[in-house]
Amino acid sequence: MILVTGGTGLLGSHLLFQLSHDNEPIRSIYRDQERIGQVESLFKFYSPENYSFLFKKIEWIQADILDSVSLNNAFKEIDVVYHCAGLVSFSKRHFNQLIKINREGTANIVNTCLEFKVKKLCYVSSTASIGGRSGEITTEATKWKQSPETNGYSISKYSGEREVWRGVEEGLDCIIVNPSVIFGAGNWDESSLTIFRTVQNGLRFYTSGQNGFVDARDVAHIMVQLTNSKIKNERYLCVGNNIPFKVLMEKIALKLEKKPPTINTPKWLTGIVWRLTWFFSLFSRKDAMLTKASSRSAFNFMTYDSSKVIEQLSFKFRTIDETIENTIKGKIK
């Protein structure tokens, strides 16, 4: 039996849809009952005529990766684990929570895998845990270098990977995938999909940076293919497209029939904005819309090399245009 953590998230829901086409029984843990409905909506989008049959293949069990007792219940008769659950935030106020969920939660998953003699763990990490530098090409072999500018999210995901490698030393077989920014059918008010909502509402500004982007369907396919293979104890970058933010915003805007952003935002202006949003967040007790870390990353020119997974799996990533079109068509309210 297969266990999926984070199955109600963007990547997790796509992974469940991918797995539902196989004959292996699937179990997914959840914390919020209402979010299961979003997963069903995703199944309906991708397979309107057969979604009910596929969706019913999933056994849902309430559990928390920070609660070892609930994990013990979820891990009964499990052979393979896909660990997608995690927290993404670039706010300093969430640092302790990031460490707790992304490192301690992953440690709990690793320990439970060892205890229940799970055959293989597939861990969803991030490009943020590799530590590439602006203007350079990042590969799986790039060495992690922490600096005063390293954000808490990167530290937490790197720490989570170390827990997985610790599990390998204790006898656990694993696969680690390092996706970049993920797009796909889903709720535009959550995770990376909020950029589509922002462009839809009208976005006049862009920054001069670049980042990697990938289709959720591609990441899910790669995860299943690697986990089902004899490959073990390897990490793989999953980046379909390296694209400047300006080009990305233009493509999304045109697909939404909106006016593309035309104003190149200078660094000094974003510096003022993140300081102001941080100041007002102190009084509103809401997360700042722009943080120091996110404003800095908006000007980084990141390039990722996914040739390892492309060559070993003979894989072809979808184009960014295909991904954008699918994300717009698959908007889930």
Image (cartoon, grey):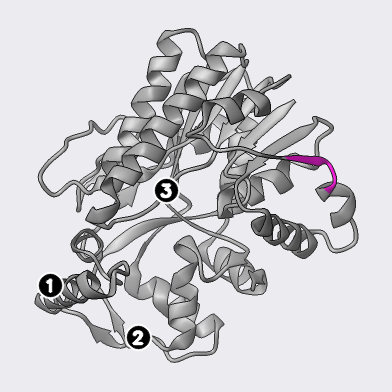
Cα gap from disc 2 to disc 1, whole angstroms: 19 Å
Residue 185 placed where, x, y %? Answer: 63, 63
Q: Residue at x 62, y 53 (%)?
A: 32
Q: Residue at x 22, y 33 (%)?
A: 144
Question: Dot 2: few (<14), some (14–19), or many (≥20) neighbours within 10 Å?
Answer: some
Q: Is residue 137 above or below residue 308?
A: below
For this view, does 76 lie left or right of residue 66?
A: right
Residue where numbered disc 3 is placed: 87
Q: Which residues, given as a range, are shown in magenta?
A: 56-60
For this view, does 22 lie left or right of residue 39?
A: right
Question: Dot 1: few (<14), some (14–19), or many (≥20) neighbours within 10 Å?
Answer: some
Residue where numbered disc 2 is placed: 261
Which image quadrant for residue 277?
bottom left
Q: Are marks 2 and 1 in contact (CB under 8 Å)?
A: no
Which quadrant is home to the N terminus? top right
Q: Is residue 126 above or below residue 257?
A: above
Residue 102 placed where, x, y %? Answer: 39, 38
Q: Secondary structure at mark 3?
A: loop
How many numbered callouts?
Answer: 3
Cα gap from disc 3 to disc 2, whole angstroms: 29 Å
Residue where numbered disc 1 is placed: 271
